[in-house]
Image (cartoon, rainbow, N blue to C red):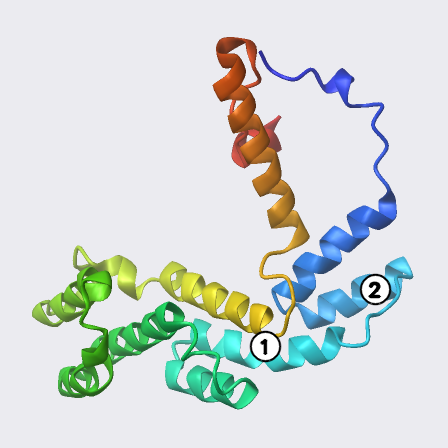
Amino acid sequence: MDVDPREYEHVKVNDNDVRKIVLSYLVHNCFKETAEAFISCTGMKRTADCSVDIDKRKPIYKHVLEGKVLKAIELTNQLAADLLQSNKDVYFDLLTLHFVELVRAKDCTGALEFAQKELRPFSSEKHLDRLQDCMALLAYEDPETSPLFSLLSMDHRQSIADALNRAVLVHANLPSYTSMERLIQHVTVVRQRLQQELGKDGPPVFGLSSFLKS
């Protein structure tokens, strides 16, 4: 059974709550100018650390998206010296991304030297598969058309930038996910539980793509 829209049309949603959800998304993802414009046009109260927080995180986020990983690491260490040491998986992702960028630039010698110096400490079983995939890129004349092309994709950079951004937010005692993401996660879990408990009599599992088309 699907949920009849008429069943929740009477549920009132506070406009201010919706604005907070939108602002949370903009601030989380470092859309500073858009966030400031949104605050201005909606008349919302500006939090004291809103712009400062974005100003600190945005350059780090931007450098990862541009493949300038060592600069992102440098800025992260300036912002919080112990952050990467306490988030080994994020640090490993950043280091392997730099390795990938060296391969992309055809600097195979530099990539090998970097791997020997920086990636050797991550040779445990936990990181072995990723290390092997990264090293395998050296075998291809054109890595971007290889079976491992996803390691050179913008989506891969984006996922690492997002993970680092969340780590920075947690370090600053700020939410690691936006209110919008948490809301979608909550709805997804609730619908999954209902589906498990009620079976065919329950609502279908929630999917954001299908919901947006409805």
Horizontal and vertical percent for residue 98?
Answer: 31, 78
> Which quarter of the rendering shows the C terminus?
top right
In the rendered view, tell whether residue 197 sits above or below residue 83: above
- Marks 2 and 1 sit apart, C-alpha to C-alpha, by 19 Å
Residue ranking furthest to the top:
201
Front residue (pair 81, 16):
81
In the rendered view, tell whether residue 133 sits above or below residue 180: below
Residue 22 badge: none
Task: Look at 57% across and 68% down and name the residue there.
Answer: 170
Front residue (pair 175, 61):
175
For label 2, the residue is 39
Q: Kindly check if marks 2 and 1 are in contact, taking CB atoms under 8 A apart as contact.
A: no
Q: Amino acid at mark 2?
A: Ile
- Number of numbered discs overlaid on the protein picture: 2
Residue 203's image quarter?
top right
Front residue (pair 176, 214):
176
In the rendered view, tell whether residue 157 sits above or below residue 67: above
Q: Amino acid at mark 1?
A: Arg
For label 1, the residue is 57
Q: Earlier in the sequence, mark 2 or mark 1?
A: 2
Residue ranking furthest to the right:
43
Disc nearest the viewer among 2 and 1? 1
Task: Look at 66% across and 81% down and name the residue there.
Answer: 55
Q: Is residue 99 left or right of residue 132?
A: right
Horizontal and vertical percent for residue 101?
Answer: 29, 76
How packed mark 1 is, by other alpha carbons closer than 10 Å (few <14, some 14-19, many 20 or more), is many
Q: Secondary structure at mark 1?
A: helix
In the rendered view, tell whether residue 200 sits above or below residue 103: above
Q: Secondary structure at mark 2?
A: helix
Task: Look at 36% across and 72% down and name the residue there.
Answer: 88
> Which quarter of the rendering shows the N terminus?
top right
